[in-house]
Image (spheres, helix red, strand yellow):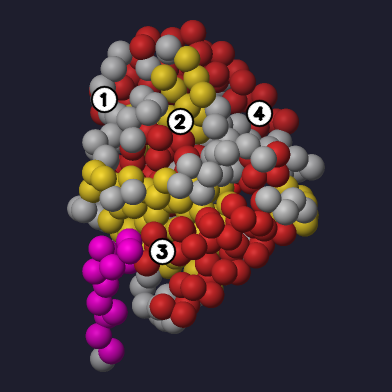
Amino acid sequence: MTAAPQTPDPRALATLAADIARTVGEQIRIARASGVEVADTKTSIVDVVTRADQHAESLAEASILAARPDDGVLGEEGAHIVGTSGITWVVDPIDGTVNYLYGLPFYGVSVAATVEDGAPGTMEDGRRAIAGAVYLPVFDELYTAWEGGGSTLNGSPLSGPTAKPLEVTLLSTGFGYTSERRTEQAQILMEVLPRVRDIRRMGSAAADLCMLAAGRIDAYYERGLNPWDYAAAALIAREAGADVRGLEATLPGTSMLIAAAPETANELHTVISTAYSSLGE
Ligand code: LIP
């Protein structure tokens, strides 16, 4: 009987994730200076993919498999390799693609090593990140975490968000690419916005969750994210002390991702849950 593959040291996986995120991030930052080309659209005319997204994902995939040839890879731009090691790398080559297209600074590379064992920390897509990194090249900020190892920004430990009453909470959120989803999100925002200090819309879920881990925002929520948007940064936020949760009994992920200090997350969860109930959801 073949032995089950041993889960590798999460710290070593985090180091690999960080190296790849930084290398790919530097490549896309340099490439941006020469311009940017839309290669295709996806769920709508405003959901774009650039040539840089495609090249970045190819580089990330090749780097992962050079280091760990038996692993799987799942990428936003189509990478889908089923591995045999039990580790699947979930990659967003450019999270914040529209920001990258417009030359705005909030974009980054997200690389997560995940397992599918259903243990606490498992997201709605069934994967659990045990190591991950997000690199924001314009700011030269590398966020790294591994399970049980805490989170760091450029090597310095992060202590995450502090608990605050919702009325003084600086909240980040994001919106989908279809008018139907944005109509619903605007209705929810109408319930949330009057109850918080202010909102920020940075355009990258990975950056949002890293800002939360760094304590630069107090809370984040979004509906409609993909696994590659959140895989690494949800771990970074959790390991910094944030409560990352879904709506009601749902695991955090595409249906809803709420992240804040536990007490703040409780308040925000109640407001969002009530808002969706009044929408008839
Ligand atoms: C983005 C997310 C962001 C969301 C955007 C978009 P992309 O991912 O990170 O939170 O609000 O609509 O989905 O498309 O730049 O990889």
- Tell me the SS state at disc 3: helix
Residue at screen point 33% across, 64% down: 15
- Tell me the SS state at disc 1: loop
- Quarter holding the N terminus? bottom left
**In the rendered structure, which disc, 3 or 4, sits on the residue that comes first in sequence?**
3
Q: Which residue is mark 1?
A: 162
Mark 4 beta carbon near ligand 1 (under 8 Å)? no
Residue 27 lies in magenta, yes or no? Answer: no
Q: CA distance from mark 3 to mark 4?
A: 35 Å
Badge 3 amino acid: Asp
Q: CA distance from mark 2 to mark 4?
A: 14 Å
**In the rendered structure, which disc, 1 or 3, sits on the residue that comes first in sequence?**
3
**In the rendered structure, which disc, 2 or 1, sits on the residue that comes first in sequence?**
1
Residue at screen point 34% across, 52% down: 144
Q: Which residue is mark 4?
A: 182
Which quadrant would residue 263 be assigned to in this image? top left
Badge 4 amino acid: Arg
- What label sits on residue 183 in the rendered view? none
Residue at screen point 65% across, 32% down: 181
Q: Which residue is mark 2?
A: 221
Q: CA distance from mark 2 to mark 1?
A: 16 Å
Q: CA distance from mark 2 to mark 3?
A: 28 Å
Q: Which residue is mark 3?
A: 19
Badge 2 amino acid: Tyr
Q: Within 10 angstroms of label 4, few (less than 14), some, or many (20 or more) residues? A: some
Give the magenta range: 2-15
Q: Nearer the viewer, residue 195 or 247?
A: 195
Residue 176 in sight? yes
